[in-house]
Amino acid sequence: MKKLVLLALVSAMFSAPLQADVKSDDVKTGAPERYTVQKGDTLWGIASRYLNDAWRWPEIWQANQQVRNPHLIFPGDSLLLCHIEQRSVVAIDTGGGCEQVLANLSNSASISGGSGSNSLSPQIRVEDLDLAIPAISLKDIRSYLTDSRVFGADDFTKAPYVLSAGSKRVLAGQGDTVYLRGKDFKLGESLGVYRKGLRYDDPETKEYLGFEGEDVASGRIVALQGDIASFEIARSTQEVRIGDRVFATEARAVTPIFYPSNPENVKAGRIIRIMGSLVNGGLNSVIVLNRGDRDGVKQGNTFALYQRGAVVTDRVKEELIRLPSERAGLAMVFRTFDKVSYAIVLRASTAISVGDEIRPPVSGD
């Protein structure tokens, strides 16, 4: 979606007072009274300037409901830190300073209360969504949003497959046509080609969680004959091989909007993989968690990371003891699957390792 129309809606659309309920002690000492948004900023980075707990950034944008979607700000916007009735808000300066912010909040509260004493005219603003400041750096996760997938064992067994590369070849690439075998193909259908990758097992229960599907290629069906389809490769990350499996392309829009939240009723878990690393990860690393949709994990859930304590020998009692885990960072989930999820590390005080623990964050995380 290239264009986004943002409206400040009238009373029927409001269900609660629009207040940014941030206590003064939640705001960092020395937070700037005014900040001009720069190209390359992220909501996480901006919130880190203002809040002690930056993952709670939605709480400081709520004063902007009358201007635009409060989770979308743009380069050049001037942000004001206003202290109103023992709470703090960060609002976009529309020219009237903090007095205008207070007036906007008062109008919003009156509208939501249904008194009818104040009214707001709908305001329409058309913006190029690509210009919006993202919640987090999309360059670090874009490929994981669009191409990477996690499959169950049955998914691969039942999926259509590459039958032949033609002309007695066993490999093919971008621009080539290969032949698929399977059921229910549709002419013109877009498909992705995947290869079985790393297997995921739960480190605690030993349950088989699935495996990473290596993104190989994508293309479309150009001809059909029975259960054989001619498949034209439009994009490839590696050579397509006989036996690779094909799946319907997921229609996933890359959005800069993430709504960080504290996971509800999600049990503590573990990191089971650090993408692109065999050993450790750090800031902006993409990690795989052993919790997914079935566990109640949602996009935007934020987890505190804990470096698992080492196992030492108690020489007095002659037994092995695991030391307490120590806080190591913070991560936010940006994509979920049935039994696992992907998250990006937003903060790291030490190296992040496979086997480290994840827990719902508490104050100070």
Image: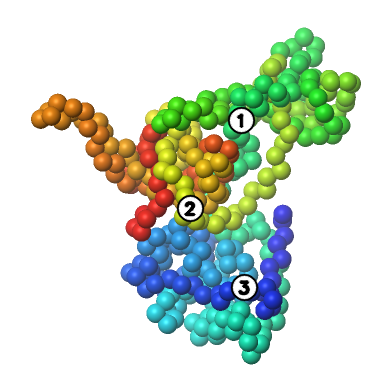
Task: Give the residue number, with chain letter if any, for mark 3.
Answer: 15
Quadrant in the rendering for residue 356: top left
| For marks 2 and 1 on the same chain, the one whose residue lies earlier in the sequence | 1
Spot occupied by residue 82 in the image (x, y as percentages of width and height): 45, 78
Spot occupied by residue 6 in the image (x, y as percentages of width and height): 68, 68
Residue situated in front as seen by the camera: 175 or 129: 129
Mark 3 vs mark 1: give the one in front: 3
Judge from the rendering whether residue 209 lies leftward or rightward of residue 219; answer left or right.
Answer: left
Residue situated in front as seen by the camera: 359 or 220: 359
Spot occupied by residue 178 in the image (x, y as percentages of width and height): 78, 20
Quadrant in the rendering for residue 258: bottom right
Task: Give the residue number, with chain letter if any, for mark 1.
Answer: 151
Q: Residue furthest left?
A: 316
Please tell me whether mark 2 sits on a helix, a strand or a loop.
Answer: loop
Q: How many marks?
A: 3
Q: Residue at x 43, y 75 (%)?
A: 88
Task: Give the residue number, with chain letter if any, for mark 2.
Answer: 264
Q: Check disc 3 and give the amino acid type.
A: Ser
Please tell me whether mark 3 sits on a helix, a strand or a loop.
Answer: loop
